Image (cartoon, helix red, strand yellow):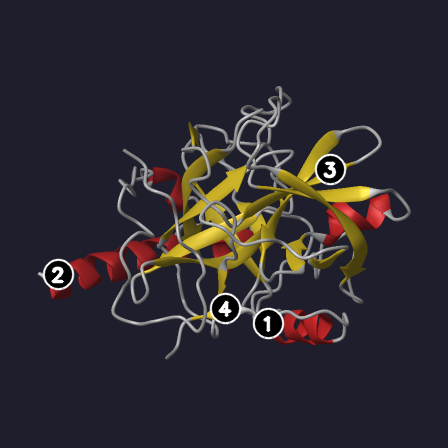
């Protein structure tokens, strides 16, 4: 059965390479993730990460309250406006997109953690002032190249069952045709209102060469630092920028941060969304954490 399954995937991918539009014919699978991130998998992690709390964006569904402890948001503290997503990676650091932070240099920003409905007071939610934002040195705001940034916090996060870090990848993994999740408080439809509650949506990773043919701006296809996702009438959207693209690693049964939401065309349209590939930027992430002057152990699978 496994051989037949693998053969079917291979045939599907072969068609996708031949016909760049073929990903539009693939139906988005709804994944029952009620038990995902609960029980531990066959392999351990070096520290606790990527767990979920038991459940029982365009086309998205509301998450359970504090279902994803790794989720965070960036708020303009003067305007009290949540404008981008982020992901907790250590007690003192979070990851987001450079296009979220670079235009807001000099503003007083905060990291919102433990939140679900941002329109209501929540005793489990907290806002920590962001001490510094570190954008990638080669970030290109016109092309969205190297669209990743590290957030350095003014005080440490207190990890609880409701707040904790994502697992980071241990290296590059071919996840084409795998389903992943995007989380965010972004718009529910193109040019529509943003959501006040955290939403989740399942998307499929598609070949980078297929994705590159859909955009005028250059997308590197050799040693790519981007990963593309697509879902029928589903997508990340405005306001989801900088937020997590997470994959349930079957080895650990924990969610691994594989991407940072970067850009797209029309939310929920026929064009894939583009995300920064976290595995590519691992050396940069570790270097910036180490040079931040604050403790920062990242968590990952023990191979």
**Residue toward you, 61 or 179:** 61
Q: Alpha carbon of mark 1 to alpha carbon of mark 3: how far?
A: 25 Å
Comes first in the chain, label 2 or label 1: 2
Disc 4 versus disc 3: distance between alpha carbons?
25 Å
Which circle marks residue 299 in the picture? 4
Of marks 2 and 4, which one's residue comes earlier in the chain?
2
Residue found at the very far top of the displayed protein = 192
Task: State the CA–CA distance, disc 2 to disc 4.
Answer: 35 Å
In the displayed image of the protein, which residue is found farthest to the right? 106
**Residue identified by numbered label 1:** 282
Instruction: Give the distance between the C-alpha atoms of the residues marked 1 and 4, in whole angstroms.
Output: 12 Å
Which numbered circle lies on residue 17? none
Element assignment for label 3: strand
Task: Check the image and report above or below for 192 versus 9.
Answer: above
Q: Earlier in the sequence, mark 4 or mark 3?
A: 3
- How far is the residue under mark 2 from the one under mark 1? 35 Å
Q: Nearer the viewer, residue 163 or 177?
A: 163
- Farthest left residue? 1
Quadrant of the drawing holding the N terminus: bottom left
Q: Which residue is denoted by mark 3 in the rendering? A: 75
Between residue 296 and residue 156, name the one nearer to us. Answer: 156
Give the mark toward the camera: 1 or 4: 4
Residue sitting at x 69%, y 52%: 97
**Which is more N-terminal, label 3 or label 2?**
2
Q: Which residue is mark 2?
A: 4
């Amino acid at each position: 059965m496994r051989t037949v399954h693998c053969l079917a995937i291979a045939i599907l991918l072969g068609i996708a390479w031949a016909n760049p539009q073929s990903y539009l014919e693939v139906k988005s699978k709804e994944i029952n993730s009620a038990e995902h991130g609960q029980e531990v998998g066959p392999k351990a992690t070096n520290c606790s990460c990527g767990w979920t709390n038991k459940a029982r964006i365009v086309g998205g569904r509301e998450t359970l309250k504090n279902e994803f402890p790794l989720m965070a948001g960036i708020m303009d503290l003067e305007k009290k406006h949540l404008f981008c997503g982020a992901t907790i990676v250590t007690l003192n650091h979070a990851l987001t997109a450079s296009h979220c932070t670079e235009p807001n240099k000099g503003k007083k920003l905060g990291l919102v953690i433990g939140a679900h409905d941002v329109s209501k007071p929540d005793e489990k939610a907290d806002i920590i002032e962001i001490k510094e934002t570190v954008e990638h040195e080669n970030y290109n705001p016109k092309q969205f190249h190297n669209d990743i940034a590290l957030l350095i916090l003014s005080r440490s996060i207190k990890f609880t069952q409701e707040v904790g870090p994502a697992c980071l990848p241990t290296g590059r993994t071919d996840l084409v045709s795998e389903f992943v999740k995007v989380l965010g408080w972004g718009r529910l439809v193109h040019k529509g209102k943003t959501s006040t509650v955290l939403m989740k949506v399942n998307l499929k990773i598609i070949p980078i060469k297929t994705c590159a043919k859909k955009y005028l701006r250059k997308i590197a296809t050799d040693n790519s630092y981007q990963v593309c996702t697509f879902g029928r009438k589903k997508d990340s959207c405005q306001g989801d920028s900088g937020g997590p693209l997470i994959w349930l690693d079957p080895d650990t049964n924990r969610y691994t941060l594989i991407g940072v939401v970067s850009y797209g065309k029309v939310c929920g349209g026929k064009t894939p969304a583009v995300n920064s590939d976290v595995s590519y930027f691992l050396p940069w992430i570790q270097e910036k954490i180490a040079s931040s002057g604050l403790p920062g152990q990242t968590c990952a699978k023990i191979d």
